[in-house]
Image: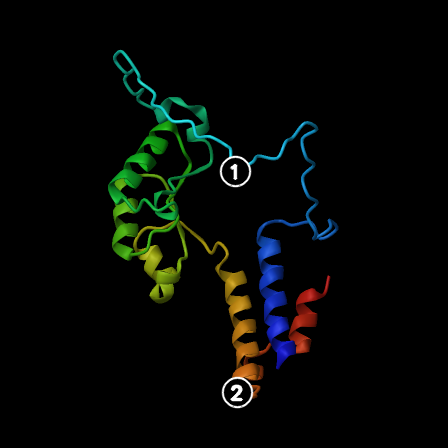
């Protein structure tokens, strides 16, 4: 079963390279950085330490208020507030940012990562621009009809279709490795169906 293990590893590697936009024409072996011309090896036994502190005097300046509505870049096309995808799931702040973009003239508002229908409804109800919603793992019980009823005007799938395809491949490989069976074949697309999709 070693070949199957290698097959799974190759698939994961290919997916990672594709996600990072890797250029397959380049060598996979990174070249070592060139040493500085006058670089000298540090003797850890005799090297010393530098300690101290920085003292700031005077009154610190006030933080400037960022007025997003005055920045033309904030009011063009689809504008997003990425709180939920960068580890700051603050719905109130997300809505405030979207409202600022709306004031600046954004055409479509997008807060990727919303994980509940209540959050989606809150965003849609707080703005008067079309809202785009990203399909997330927690959206397994969502439907187009559900989101339409909430007032969503656009739905993005992100990487979920590619990950679903890779998930099917991995489940098939694990079935062969762990059970020696081929039940996954019943869900495979037929050669005729694939050929029809590839026709010009």
* Residue at disc 1, secondary structure: loop
Residue 88 place in picture, x, y as percent = 32, 44
Q: Using the image, determine if residue 38 lies above or below residue 144.
A: above
Contact (Cβ within 8 Å) of mark 1 with mark 2: no
Residue at which label 2 appears = 179
Where residue 92 sits in the image (x, y, percent)?
24, 41
Image quarter hosting the C terminus: bottom right
The x and y percentages for residue 90 are 27, 44
Quadrant of residue 31 within the rendered picture: top right
Disc 2 is placed on an element classified as helix
Residue occupying the point 62% across, 77% down: 4
In the picture of the structure, the residue carrying the numbered disc 1 is 44
Is residue 165 or residue 190 the one in the foreground? 165
Residue 70: name its quadrant. top left
Residue lying at the far top in this picture: please name it: 58
Q: Residues within 10 Å of mark 2 (few under 14, many from 20)?
A: few
**Can see residue 184?**
no
Q: Is residue 166 left or right of residue 127?
A: right
Q: CA distance from mark 1 to mark 2?
A: 54 Å
Task: Give the residue displayed 25% in from the left and 54% down from the top.
Answer: 118
How many marks are shown on the rendered structure?
2
Q: Is residue 5 above or below residue 58?
A: below
Q: Nearer the viewer, residue 187 or 13?
A: 13
Label 1 vs label 2, nearer the camera: 1
Closer to the chain start, of discs 1 and 2, is: 1
């Amino acid at each position: 079963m070693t070949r199957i293990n290698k097959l799974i590893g190759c698939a994961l590697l290919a997916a990672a390279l594709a996600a990072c936009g890797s250029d397959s024409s380049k060598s996979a072996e990174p070249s070592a950085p060139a040493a500085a011309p006058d670089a000298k090896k540090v003797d850890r036994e005799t090297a010393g330490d530098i300690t101290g502190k920085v003292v700031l005097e005077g009154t610190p300046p006030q933080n400037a208020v960022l007025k997003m509505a005055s920045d033309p870049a904030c009011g063009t096309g689809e504008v997003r507030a990425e709180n939920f995808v960068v580890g700051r799931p603050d719905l109130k702040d997300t809505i405030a940012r979207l409202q600022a973009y709306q004031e600046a003239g954004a055409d479509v508002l997008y807060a990727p990562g919303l994980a509940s229908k209540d959050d989606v409804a809150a965003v849609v109800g707080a703005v008067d621009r079309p809202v785009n919603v990203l399909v997330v793992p927690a959206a397994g019980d969502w439907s187009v009809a559900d989101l339409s009823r909430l007032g969503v005007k656009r739905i993005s799938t992100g990487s979920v279709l590619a990950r679903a395809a890779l998930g099917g491949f991995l489940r098939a490989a694990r079935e062969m490795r762990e059970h020696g069976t081929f039940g996954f074949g019943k869900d495979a697309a037929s050669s005729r169906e694939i050929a029809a999709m590839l026709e010009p």
